[in-house]
Image (cartoon, rainbow, N blue to C red):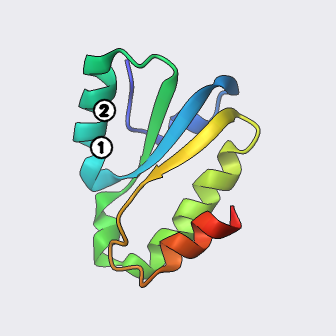
Amino acid sequence: MVTARSSAIRKATPDKTLIVACGALAREITALITTQGWSRIAVTCLPASLHNQPRQIAGRLRTVILAAEGRYRRVMVAYGDCGSGGAINAVLAET
């Protein structure tokens, strides 16, 4: 079962892909992974409440991506700009 909690990054799973997503998408992404049977995909979501503080999104995203380094084969990000003013794209370029 896929969970939408940050505990997904604690265990080393180098054969898996991690999706870091906006909490507003957690239910849909989790349902898609479950219905498709994608057992090699883990998901962790930042709180949807960050939409109220979009300047914090990029920093929180960077922290999660860096914490996942070496623990996953690949890290994917499922986010729109979410009011970050391009800061999410900057994090993606740097990481």
Q: Secondary structure at mark 2?
A: helix
Amino acid at pointer 2? Thr
Check the picture and name the quadrant holding the C terminus: bottom right
- Expressed as whole percent of the image width and height from the top left, the position of residue 27 reads 23, 39
Marking on residue 26: 1
Asked if 19 appears above or below 46 in the picture, the reply is above
Quadrant of res 71: top right
- Residue at x 48%, y 30% (from the top left corner): 42
Marking on residue 81: none
- Residue at x 41%, y 79% (from the top left corner): 84
Quadrant of res 30: top left
Reading the image, the residue beneath label 2 is 30
- In 3D space, how far apart are the residues under numbered discs 2 and 1 (Cα atoms)? 6 Å
Give the left or right position of residue 54, taking residue 27 as reference: right
- Expressed as whole percent of the image width and height from the top left, the position of residue 2 reads 39, 25
Check the picture and name the quadrant holding the N terminus: top left
